[in-house]
Each structure stands twice: as C-alpha cells, then as structure tokens.
Amino acid sequence: MSQRLTVNGRPREVEASEDTPLLTVLRDELGLVGSRFGCGQGLCGACLVLLDGVAVPSCQTPLSQAAASAGVVTVEGLSEGGTPHPVQTALLEGQAAQCGFCISGIVVRAAALLATNPSPTGDEVAEALERNLCRCGVQRRIIDAVVAAGSAP
Amino acid sequence: MTSSAVATVPLHITGNPRLGTWLSVADGVVVVHVGKVELGQGILTALAQIVADALGLPVAALRMRAAHTADGPDEGLTAGSLSVLQAGPALRHVGAVVRTLTGGPAGDLTDYVARIAALDPATDLCEVAPAAAGPAVAVGLSEDRLDLPDKVLGRPRYLADLRPEGLLHGRVLRPAAPGASLVSLADLDLPGVQVVRDGSFVGVVGEREADVDVAIARLAAAATWSEGHELPDEDDLSAWLRAGPHDEIPVLDEDGPSAPGHVATYSKPFLVHASIAPSAGMARWTDDGLHVWSHSQGIHGLGLAVAAALGLEPDAVTVEHVENAGCYGHNAADDAAFDAVLLARAVPGRPVLSRWSRTDELTWGPLSSAMTATIGADLVDGRINGWSYDVWSLGHTARPGYSGAPGLLAGAHLADPVTLPPPTDPPPVAGGGTTRNAIPGYEVGPRHIAGHRRTNTPLRTSAMRALGAYLNVFAIESFMDELALAAGADPVDFRLAHLDDDRAAHVVRRAAELAGWGGTLPDDTGRGLGFARYKDKGAWCAVVAEVAVDHAVHVRRLTVVADIGLVVNPDGARNQLEGGATQATSWTTTERVRLDRRRITSDDWETYPILRFADAPLVEVELVEGDAPSLGAGEAAQGPTAAAIANAVHDALGVRVRDLPLTADAVVRAIEAAE
C-alpha cells in the first residue's frame, strides 16, 4: 500500500502497510539510518524524531500517523544543508559521546527543547532527557553541551 | 639485520611481522590496519595519535581501518584495558621501521607518502632496525575523536546500518527459558519470509525488516518449549554460589588468621551489559567461503569459533569488525554473528543482517556473575595484622574458544548441539576473573586469599568491565572503612598508613584533597573514598563520592584521580574515567538482574532500569602527569566508585550496606539489621 509523508521537508512516497513502524520506514525504505533501533518499545530514546515539532519514538509511531502529520524531521534533517544543528556542534566541541548510539535521539530531543526554551539550565536539560538512556556514562558532558548550545550567541 | 633489533620487537609485531599487514597506501592516504577495535572508547583515535607520531605524519594524513582477519594484524581481544599497552609499542615499531626504510618524513608530505607506498609489503618488521623515536606531536594532545562526527550527525556507522546489495534481514527466536528445547512449532503461513530451523534453533530471513519482525512474533506465539533449567533463588544468590560444586582458585596462603577479630560479608547481584543497541551480525556464504561482519571484541577468536562449530577450515571464515553501540565486555556480539551465519547458510550468496531484540539482549547475552565475599582481619594497635579473603562467583569468561569450545549461544540449540561448557576465568597472568583484585593493595600482614568458582550454572556469565574486580574492590574498600572505624582512625589516614606505594598514596591523598575531605556537609549527606590499582599492575585510581540519602541514594559528585602513566589523549582518558565512574554508579545504585525460578524477568528498560540523566553525578577527573608506560583507563574506576558510594552512605547514615545494589530497599534492610 502506498503512503505519502513529508520527511525533512521533502514529500516522500513509500510502499508499506500503514501500521509499519516509522523507524523501519526511515531506515529501510528511505535510507535514513540516523534514527537508531535501541529497544522497539519507546523506552530508550535512540529512535526519536520530530513529528509536528514534538519528539516521539519512531519505533512506536505507525506510518499512518506520520503520513497524517504535517511532517517528520529526523536527525539528518537537523543538519541539512551541511550546517550542523547547534546541539551537534556543541556535542562535538565537548566530545560528548562515547559509543554515540544514543546520541541521535538526544540531538532530536535537545533540538526540540531549545525550540521552546532557547537557554535551558542544566537541570532543565536533564529533565528533558529523562527518557533518553545513555549507557557509556556521558550524561554530564551531554548536559553541559546542550546548555552550551543554548547559551551560544 | 641486527640481533638487537630482533630483541626489542614488540609481541604484536612478532606475531604479525609483515609490513603490509599493518600499513597500506590508498589514494595518497596512509591506511593503518589495527587489530584493536573501536568499542566507543575512542581507541582508534588514540592509536592514530601514536602511529602518526611514529611515522612523523599528521593524524589527518592517516586513515584507521577496522580490524579484519584476512587483512590486518591479529592483536587478540580488545579487552582488559590493554589496548594502548599492547598496540602502542607495535605501532611505534611499525612507524620506526618505515622511517628507517624511507629515510623518514624529510621533504614534502606527498613525497613521503609515495616513499611509504613504494615499500615492499612483504618486509619483515623483525628484520629491520627501527629508527630512533621522533618527537611527540599528536601524543599528549586531546585530539577529537575520529568516529564522533558520523555518530553525532546521524550518518551510517553501525553494523545495523549496513545495506549491501541483496541484503536480507534476519531474526532468531530464542527459547522460552534457559535450557528449554523446542517441543513443537505450528506450521504458519508467513508472507515474505523463509523459516530456518535446526533443532531448537528457529529463525527467519526476508527482504523486509517489517516482515521478519511480524514473522518472528507470530512464531514466538506458535512455539511450545520444554520447561528448561531451574534458576537460583534471586534473594539467596550468595548461598547458591557458596553451595558449589567449585573449582578452587588458590591465590595466597601465608598463614592468614583462622579466627579473625573483624569479619564482614559483601555481595553483588547478576548484572547485564545493557548496551543501548541490541547485538547484531551480518554474514554471507559464497563459493569462496564465509564472510562475517561483527562488533565482537575478538574477531580472530570469533572466526576460529565459527569454523570449529561448523566444521569449516579456519581460513574459510573471514571476519571484519564493524562498530556497534558501546561494548563493556563479552556481550552478545559473537552470538549475534553466529546467528547471522546460521541464517545466511540457508540463502547462499545473500548477506543476512540479523539483529537481536531488546528482550533477548537483556536476557540471553552473557551476564556479569553474582558474587559474594567474606573478609576477616585482625587489628593490632590500630594496624591490620592478618587478612583472610574468600570470594565465590561463577566464571568470568565464556568467550569464543574458552575451555576449547566455540562458545556461541545458538550452537547449543542446534539439532546436533555444540554445547556451552560452564564459564571459567581468565588465567592469573591476564588478571584472573573471580579473583581479579582479590589481593588488597595494602600492607596487611599474613594473608589467606582464595577464590571459589561455582561450576554448575544454568546461567551463562562472562567478562564485563573490571570482571571480579568490581566486587572485590567494593568489598576490600568497604572493609577498610569498617576497620578504620574500629581503629578510631580517619579512613584516608588509615589507608595511607597501610600503603607502601607512592603512586597509590598520591592518588588517595589527591582525591581526598580535591574533594574537600574532612569539610562539613549537610545532614543526610556523606563522603566516602575507594581506591585500587586495577589488576594489581594497571592504573591507580582513587574515587571520592559525595552522596545524599533521602528515600534513595543520590550520588551527587565523584572526584576521580587516576595515574595511567603517559597519557596519549587526555580528554579521551578523562571521558573513559568519567564514563566508567558514571556506569559504576548505575551498577551500584540501581542495577540487578531479576529472576524467577525459570527465566530472567528483567527483560526491558523498566524492569532493568539504568541511571537516568537527572541522577548522573558530576564527575571531576584529575590525571596524574608522568611519562611511565601508558596504562588503560576504562576499567580503573569501577570498583573504587562502588566502594566510595557505599562508604559515603555509611558516612551519611551511619549504616553499612554490604549487599549491592544500594537501592532504597537495601538501605532500609541495612538499617533494620543494624537495629
């Protein structure tokens, strides 16, 4: 079944049933592997995307819901045109990752936070990332980087 | 040839003596083939810095290629905090030989790279006298990680991102419980997939990931399994570990005390790696042999194990490393690779990418063993005079090839099974497992120290960051505080009085100083210290924890001081110590594998919670400056952090918690026991 949706500002059409998880569509049909599969249960945050500007786990978002939205933005879409999002720049400046598998979802959630709260405190960042998991123990560097991204001129 | 050149050749060069095994030139870039693998720890960046200086080239002129069994050195496992120690000297030797043969980096860079390209790849690195070391340019700098841009910008980088031509996706249905075998499987119409079955091994392959996911869920519902093994009582793991049967591991017997005046018992539960990505593997069978893509810590061992399990010639199997999420020891990477091999066997010529589920990752990957230890000591005039230590555990290695077995999970489920022997321990020369860091680093008089490895287990355990050192250091360092209290001494002074090692004393003193040791703290807040020299011959590390206790234990701040010798990449080393201490905080305050008598019940992120952002402590790291040989940083903080937290909880509440994790329940139980 053909479904139309907007991803990173571009209209796309995919052949997949409407209950296919958006994550699978992004990774396998659209070649956007930046959204990572971590748990498939919406509990780790590795697959977050923006759906109408709100960070949602794409593993728990059926294709039909994405098709009904105004648009999906993935981690790739945040640096489109070759300019990294300020969160990405700050994460690289702070070397705020180890294995990096969690970081796509963290970038997406932090970008959503900065869109509504441009200069968050460390506590606000930690609260926003409450449902993102990091196993390598880089949480403090990540919090500092997001705060720095918010403070950037 | 000179005999002195041969005498100084590093071990990894002796085993891999061809120049072409280590270096090639492609498109004007020097490609460095290393045997150590990127696990998220930044090792390829640190090694790039070393080899850049050795060659006299900038890091940007190099490309680090992932490990490959057919075209790269065999450097064994990437484990045990040994990568810089082992691979560093080898890369320095390669660079020094290249400078001998080419005359070094005089002239312009393009010309130098052309001279490197012209070298004979068959050159025997053992037969050329290495040139004297050039200046350190990159080493000592905090070079940015080479792998992070791809990761932060969401580019393809991980094994599950591979999309080769003709790719099929695969999934495997694991048994309903450890030891269970397949009784029946209903015949289902499963669109878009092919079922692969061999005994109790059941999997599917298909063109579309959505189809294999649906199919495996339907197969799970359609399968019936035998009951499987009985698992131990999760609330009485210590008794189960002590019940045996055991392999005995004598460590020291110096006529230690038989009836010591002070005795205490400590424990930790089973833990799981809990990597953010489930394990994955890819494989393709062709007429030329079997090619495997894996995030294994030891691709050569994996290749040999796959060959042994399937009766192939070892050189018929090629394994190359591809990164996946963080690896903290022997996780399910090797098992996932073997799953892919078994699935791909059914579809010759097609690459099959098999990925585990989150549930399987948390319940079927090798566990970190539950452990318990009893320590006794005598105090004479405020000094320790006599020490006894007994520790009980399951084994800490079940890596491919252990005990002569392939050690790949799915092997045990085949119709013609390749069984999994009980886990064992690495040898003492590799730091041991159960008894890693069982010897206290203090002057304690005559010592009795022994390990007891339970050999009969329904649960598979293997190496996880620090192995037995996590519990052993937690126990020893908690007990040091208990003895200090009994002696009426300050815990830092008490340790310093028993230390005869300047580098040890320095990190203890410095961590206390930086953390404001002795300064006042608010009510229900405490400070504690833990120290160890990892594996008795690795990094020295002291940690001071500051905790606040209300309904739970909150670790606010960790001060880490480590002496890892010459620091190749200071920010990278700090990142490893911060991460190690933070992960150890998660283990210590939160984590516990849950069991009923049939299966592991902690099978998602709600039933196996790990530390969340709001609970992550502030971590301050100081590295001791020096030019002694480099030592690994990744595992040094695990044990000291656990002990520092427990000692800080005692400082806050006056209650000693000896059983991990330090959850609210454990604190309440300890308070009740004390009353």
Image (cartoon, coloured by chain):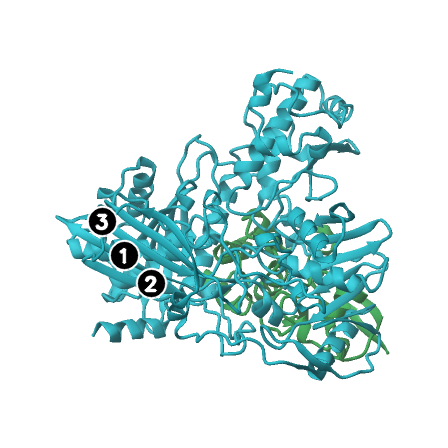
Chain colours: A green, B cyan
Residue closer to the observer: A8 or B161: B161
What's the residue type where badge 3 is placed? Gly
- Sequence-wise, the earlier of marks 3 and 2 is 2
State the image quarter where residue A7 is shown.
Answer: bottom right
Q: Position of B397 compared to B357: left or right?
A: left
For disc 1, the marked residue is B479
Q: Secondary structure at mark 2?
A: strand
For disc 2, the marked residue is B266
Q: Nearer the viewer, mark 3 or mark 2?
A: 3
| Marks 2 & 1, CB-CB < 8 Å contact | yes
Q: CA distance from mark 1 to mark 3?
A: 14 Å
| Chain where mark 2 sits | B
State the image quarter where residue B28 is shown.
Answer: top right
Q: Secondary structure at mark 3?
A: strand
What's the residue type where badge 1 is placed? Phe
Task: Report crowding for label 3: few under 14, some 14 to 19, many 20 or more residues within 10 A (C-alpha).
Answer: many
What's the residue type where badge 2 is placed? Tyr
Which residue lies at the image location 59% right of the left edge and 46% below the top edge? B77
| Marks 3 & 2, CB-CB < 8 Å contact | no
State the image quarter where residue B204 is shown.
Answer: bottom right
